[in-house]
Image (cartoon, rainbow, N blue to C red):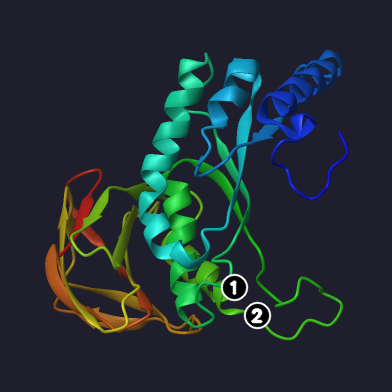
Amino acid sequence: YPYNGNRAGQAALSPTAYATNTLAYISAMKAVDPNIKIGVGVWCPDTNNDNPLLFNVLGSKIDFLIVHWYPGSSAISMEQSLPSYIASIRNQIAAAGGNRNIPFAITETNADGAFGTALDAVWNADNYLTWFELGAVNVDYWELYDSDGVLSSPTSPLDPYYAIQFASTVARAGDNLVTTSSSNSLLRSHAVMRSDGSVGVLLLNENSSSTNVSVSISGTTVATSGSVYTLNPTYDAAASSISGIGNSFSVTVPASTAIGILIPTTGGGGGCTATAI
């Protein structure tokens, strides 16, 4: 079937055809190298219920799943729905005999023009951390250092570039992301038990006004002072000191801004949870 620019009705481009062709490809590749790892693209969200058609053919043959995540104008609300999307995909692949805990590779993502402001950076920091909490093995942002997809004459880093720097200052490779919750849908929260024994709390305000946040940390005892990093709109690697904190404290997060707070632990507990109200 010739491709006429519209995938609808093209049998050769259907989910089942994609799965059948992919199965032949996987079989041929693993006949040469049984240890090779092959990923398969899935729909997220799956508005047409196509993923089960893919999994029913491929079953346990998939080593990892590939997602292109472009939530567009609904970027903030769709980010909040990611856990349910991923849970559904995991349930579907398990029902077809695949690995429920299969890794995800996010090979393309951005807010797809939803913001055009410093909120791009705040959303991207949340985007990265949310995907890693959900079991992603990598996240690749499109794009960090230009605005037209052409790197022949780059100008300067875009806001999302600084978001990755900011997030990785608080949550580094080797640290453990832990459970958090927030009662404010526009105040996103993440927390990490760091390999150096300290606790990192990230608060990301996607609101158009400042938000006063009450933070509660349980499961370990933390100090009453620490360091704070700010993302608005670009990231300053220099930390400021913060005092009057501890296991319960309040902090104001300005509009379209993210802050990351590092707090040493003073003993007790092997993990933590954080609640933002």
Q: In the rendered image, which quarter contains the N terminus?
A: top right
Residue 185: give x, y in percent of width and height: 26, 63
146, above or below 270, in the image: below
Q: CA distance from mark 1 to mark 2?
A: 6 Å
Please tell me in which quadrant of the rendered image residue 253 appears.
bottom left
The residue shown at (84%, 43%) is: 3
Disc 2 packing (10 Å; few <14; some 14–19; many ≥20): some
**Residue 84 or residue 162, whichever sits in front:** 84
Disc 1 packing (10 Å; few <14; some 14–19; many ≥20): many
Element carrying mark 1: helix
Q: Residue furthest left?
A: 248
> Amino acid under label 2?
Pro
**Residue 195 or residue 95, whichever sits in front:** 95
Residue 216: give x, y in percent of width and height: 14, 61
Residue 189's tag is: none
Residue 232: give x, y in percent of width and height: 43, 84
Residue 161's tag is: 1
**Residue 273 or residue 99, whichever sits in front:** 99
**Residue 255 or residue 53, whichever sits in front:** 53
Please tell me in which quadrant of the rendered image residue 123 appears.
bottom left
> Amino acid under label 1?
Tyr
Q: Are marks 1 and 2 in contact (CB under 8 Å)?
A: yes
**Residue 131 at least partly seen:** yes
Q: Which residue is mark 2?
A: 157
**Residue 169 at least partly seen:** no
Side of 55 where 154 appears, left or right:
right
The residue shown at (47%, 28%) is: 101
Residue 9: give x, y in percent of width and height: 71, 36
10, above or below 60, in the image: below
Element carrying mark 2: loop
Q: In the rendered image, which quarter contains the C terminus?
A: bottom left
